[in-house]
Amino acid sequence: MRAPARVCRWSQEPAPTAPAAPAPSPLHPCDDDINNRLAIWQGDISTLEVDAITNSTDETLLECNVVSERILHTAGPDLKEEIVDRALECRVGEVVVTPGFGLRCRHLIHTVCPNYRAEYRSAAETALYNCYRNVLCAASEMGVGSLALCVISAPRRIFPTDLAAHVALRAIRQHLERSSSPSLVVLAGSASTLAPLRALAPAYFPRRVAPAPPLPPPADRRIRIIHNPHSHAAHADDDTSLCDEDAAMEAAAAFARACSPDTQRLLPSARPPPVRRVNTDQYERLLRRARSEDLSSVSGIGCLYQSGVDRLGRPVVVFIGKWFPISDIDLEKALLYLIKLLDPIVRGDYVIAYFHTLTSANNHPPFSWLKEVYTVLPYKYKKNLKAFYIVHPTFWTKMMTWWFTTFMAPAIKAKVHNLPGVEFLYAAMPRDQLEVPAFVTEYDMTINGLHYFQPDTSST
């Protein structure tokens, strides 16, 4: 791996002594290994000696912005000949890889940033996220050890700097959590382009802060303990010895009261124990975001919706696994949409029907995301969930469900039911209350036939 010697890792970069604004609240846990794989470096990206360099350009790969012009000039005429001879083009959000030629790198990864328009903010944000994600994925597929990543949102695209910084840092953090390659990502640029990234980096890459040394107790609260207060008092004046003896005895009694665990159990606590509100506060922040942000990119997929009620009048939430594209969806927005849809439903009892019909590896969410979702959602989600039906499960689904409910979500293990066909659901909910896509029922008929199960609803 080519690693630039003059680049300081984020974990080693000193924190500002007098920040202009308070540090943002961390959105991810502190991870020293991930922090050691990130660097924010001010300078000319074309001078870095790394395995791959990113070039933010246009569809023709020949746009002459400030950064791209330096890259094209340093790479030499061979790069332009490569682009022209092969008629290379790149769409917005995608990447094209060429050799580095005269640059001090083996690979040059080109990508195209979208134009920003306020009325299409969600689409522009998703496209910019795809730029960073596809660059990182391409570098990982090529086995790149070190990647120099420019600020892809060029000024001429009129992208808000704070929004672009959030997108860039979120994409980098999520990729570094999922993949071990690249082992070093260098965010390179000028001081003005890196300023919002440096300001927001502590939220996505929090660092450990050395604890401050404990303050000495006030002079009037110090307790002096001497070896033998009685013998010490015998060698002093009578008045002084009496004062010292009383003080020593009082100090010894106070020390005994403070150290006695039995006394601590009997005495009423002067201050109630602190209430943990970490998950609650985080959930409230996500709920506010879910109500204010545009989530049409996720809601339009149609993989999660409410479909009527079951035979006990409880709302039924349907999740279609095949329509959940992991590679094309922003998992953070998916979590926000989940919260927005379920928050009014989970105030009472509810059930979930998950259809695993015809799903593939591209539809399986990572366990890290499932764990995050289960941790963020408050207790009412687990308490009021009365049944979780998995229709058309596979062996992999049963094994993963058992593992997840045993070691990560034991509170819902008894509520999970694997059903081999759709008609088994009709014992729990009326047929006219369940709306599922046509491909689910068609697949169900091919493997189970027609009317293979007749629910007994007499007891309900």
Image (cartoon, grey):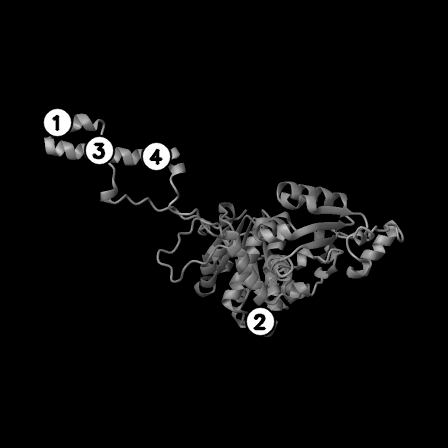
Q: Secondary structure at mark 3?
A: helix
- Residue 144: tell me if it is visible: no
Contact (Cβ within 8 Å) of mark 1 with mark 3 = no
Residue 284: horizontal and vertical position, in percent? 53, 59
Q: Amino acid at mark 4?
A: Cys
Distance Cα–Cα, label 1 vs label 2 = 86 Å
Q: Secondary structure at mark 2?
A: loop
Contact (Cβ within 8 Å) of mark 2 with mark 4 = no
- Mark 1 and mark 3 lie on one chain; the one further toward the N terminus is 1
- Residue 282: tell me if it is visible: yes
Mark 2 or 4: the one toward you: 4
As drawn, the label of residue 452 is none
Q: Amino acid at mark 1?
A: His
- Mark 1 and mark 4 lie on one chain; the one further toward the N terminus is 1
Against 164, residue 14 (above or below) is above
- Badge 3: how crowded within 10 Å, few (<14), some, or many (20+)? many
- Mark 2 and mark 4 lie on one chain; the one further toward the N terminus is 2
Q: Which residue is mark 2?
A: 116
- Badge 2: how crowded within 10 Å, few (<14), some, or many (20+)? many
Distance Cα–Cα, label 1 vs label 4 = 30 Å
Q: Which residue is mark 3?
A: 248
Q: Quadrant of residue 192?
A: bottom left
Q: Quadrant of residue 295?
A: bottom right
Q: Secondary structure at mark 4?
A: helix
Distance Cα–Cα, label 4 vs label 3 = 16 Å
Q: Residue at x 60, y 53 (%)?
A: 380
Q: Nearer the viewer, residue 396 or 436?
A: 436
As drawn, the label of residue 259 is 4
- Badge 1: how crowded within 10 Å, few (<14), some, or many (20+)? few
Q: Residue at x 62, y 50 (%)?
A: 383
Q: Which residue is mark 1?
A: 235
Q: Amino acid at mark 2?
A: Tyr
